[in-house]
Amino acid sequence: MSQPQPEDEPISPGYIPIDPSFIDRNSPLSSNLMEDLRSNEELTDDRISELMRQFSSGFSEQYPTPGPSLYMGSLDNALTMSVYNQSNAQPLILFLYHGRTVSTNVFCRQVLCAKDITDYIEKNFIVWAWDRTNDVNYQKLLAIVGKHLGKPIKEQIASLPTESFPALICLAYNNAEIQITNVIQGCVPHCDALESLKEARDRFDYRIETPNSAGPLWKLSINEVWQMEPSVLHPIEKSSEEFERVAGAYARQKEHVVEIGKVENSSWLLQYNDKEKFIRERKNHGQIEEYLLYPCSQTSAQYILTYGFNNDHKVRTHHHGWHFQSPESYRRNYLSSDVGNGSPNPNALLVCRVLVGQTWYKDETIRPNPLACDSVTDGSGTYILDSNRNILPVYYVKYGL
């Protein structure tokens, strides 16, 4: 059954995080699939085609099946045959291999050699591969990606830690530029990898052409593999101390509040707790959690509490993402009428626990990168998030008209 669609805005790449339980540390390390390149070597199209054949042959020799079919040419030509193909456009996968990580052998055998995975990729994607095991090969990869895909994608790939490889980087064409839609890291199980591949294909298929745009735009789609049960709202008595405390601490003006509900959602809480544990294990220092506010329409609030945040709730200005505000910032912005997260009628408020975690400070030269940070901030009380797992609604506040 299709979900109801809310009122706000779209977009940003999604990724599946590492699942440590998937790593088999007793599994033997794999070996390289491409020869080591020289730093001064010029990579012609013919040379790259030769390396692709090496990769394909090496994979077939090392693993039970040949794995996904590869495009046997340059990245430039792979783009022409995939996302730039006007008659039969397809999303492109960059299969980035590393022969010395503990997850490579298991991922290649259990995921990339699985028949349902290879069949789905064969029907829905074009795949271009590279072995980044050797340092020189890795620098050559980054140079190729920077030349043909641009600096932002090069930086996102460079930000991935070594242990996250091998990786499948899913690409599509959007708003006149190539963008990452999904990143499937090497430490994810078969079911999650297949789900993310399907999501990447769906996001590609849901793009639409408009006569006034320079390129395709996305229709509605969530930015991560996300499932939850609908939230339960427990009304708080207006005469209670809790109602007074919440309205006084978070509402724009206490007298405007007509209803407050306490949000209960055990499935969302479980995923939030797992993400909090993951962030703490990274040995982040300082405060990783804040109570932040998400002003929106009542319709959007009800949608979020039923299905979670999706790309329709993202703000297009500055950095794409879900914009949360500290209580001080919210009240300050309310006075300047800049509080609504794109909503024309911000008559509701979600009070949320938010895992700000590793934060980047926004400036003109840095683009937010969900592969390397948990949130982006402007330093004035606004935080930008890109994953439901970092957010847990606690209270729903409804204002009078």
Image (spheres, helix red, strand yellow):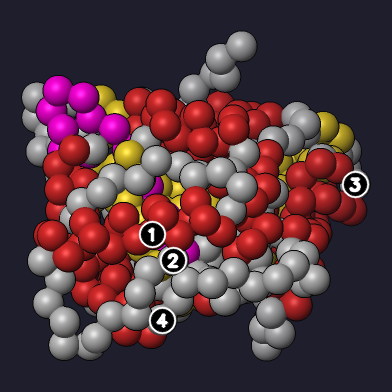
N-term mark: 2 or 1: 2
Q: CA distance from mark 1 to mark 3?
A: 67 Å
Is 5 rendered above or below residue 251?
A: above
Residue type at mark 1: give it.
Phe
Q: Position of residue 208 (x, y in %)?
A: 25, 25
Residue at the image point whose x is 75% and y is 58% from the top: 22
Q: Position of residue 184 (x, y in %)?
A: 53, 53
Q: Which residue is mark 2?
A: 33
Q: Which residue is mark 3?
A: 240
Residue type at mark 2: give it.
Leu
Discs 4/3, front: 4
Q: Judge left or right: residue 78 versus residue 9.
A: left
Is 285 rendered above or below residue 148?
A: below
Residue type at mark 3: give it.
Ser
Residue at the image point whose x is 75% and y is 40% from the top: 260
Is 258 rendered above or below residue 142?
A: above
Q: Position of residue 373 (x, y in %)?
A: 51, 71
Residue type at mark 4: give it.
Asn
Q: Which residue is mark 4?
A: 134
